[in-house]
Amino acid sequence: MNAEPQPHKGEPHSRNTGQKLNWLRAGVLGANDGIVSTAGVVIGVAGATPHNVTAIATAGIAALVAGAFSMAGGEYVSVSTQRDTEKALIAQEKWELETMPEQEREELADLYRQRGLSDHLSHQVADELMAKDALAAHAEIELGIDPDNYTNPWAAAGSSFVSFTLGALIPLVMILLPVGVHRVWIAAAAVVLGLFLTGWISATLGGAARGRAVIRNVVMGSATMVATYLIGLAFGTAVA
């Protein structure tokens, strides 16, 4: 006796999976920003005052705190704006469904026709979806919004704050190790390794070519460190 086929349970979660991957990519990019920006500051200061650990630590901690709050604040404002826009669009869609239901039915059917369904099937799908949840049906296909799952600005801000901080700790901790004149090289090596990992992970999550992503990431981060070190070195020489 054949077993009854089990319903596929992966597809209904595809939207949530996509959102989680987007948050993860954003976290990796936040960590990457923390690595590069903080490395630029501490290596620049180390170029100017290689033996002044207090100055290096102060600049690094200030860069970490300022960058983390800046990233979190920017993400909060950006996602809050997106959330407000989503709510406004849903409110407009709700009003249209209440005042012009037949036009909305035709609009939904037309959207399915554009996706390749026949006229009869498009109307049938539209009628069945609207009978179940008209607002959700229109929001999903017309606006790409889940009215029960708005974007969360606090989650975005918290994720950016944490990821930036974790990334920034790599160059900050490494350059404060008691290794004397080798501190810049050790910090730079740790940064390159961190950039390799963030480039690899972000490319993997995005389905892009890993090699090119890693090379771009490492080259840009290394160029930042070289530039800030030379600036610090020039200022240190001038002051001396």
Image (cartoon, helix red, strand yellow):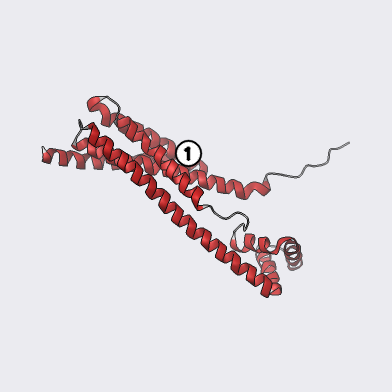
Q: Residue at x 22, y 27 (%)?
A: 181
| Residue 88 location, quadrant | bottom right
In the rendered image, which residue does mark 1 sit on? 201
| Residue 55 location, quadrant | top left
The residue lying toward the viewer, choosing from 71 and 202, is 71
- Is 235 displayed left or right of 134 in the figure? left
Q: Where is residue 155 shown, x and y percent of the image? A: 51, 48
Q: Residues within 10 Å of mark 1 (few under 14, many from 20)?
A: some
| Residue 52 location, quadrant | top left
Which image quarter is the C terminus in? top left
Residue furthest top as drawn:
179
Q: For mark 1, give the secondary structure.
A: helix
Q: Which residue type does callout 1 highlight? A: Ile
Q: Residue at x 25, y 36 (%)?
A: 56
Which image quarter is the N terminus in? top right
* Tally of numbered tags: 1
- Is 167 displayed left or right of 145 in the figure? left
Q: Residue at x 61, y 50 (%)?
A: 15
Q: Where is residue 61 shown, x and y percent of the image? A: 31, 39
- Is 227 displayed left or right of 234 in the figure? right
Q: Where is residue 224 shown, x and y percent of the image? A: 29, 43
Q: Residue at x 65, y 64 (%)?
A: 138
Residue furthest right as drawn:
1
Q: Where is 73 relative to 112, above or below?
A: above
Looking at the image, can residue 170 be seen?
yes
- Is 56 displayed left or right of 128 in the figure? left
Looking at the image, can residue 212 be seen?
no
The residue lying toward the viewer, choosing from 199 and 39, is 39
Q: Where is residue 100 shown, x and y percent of the image? A: 68, 75
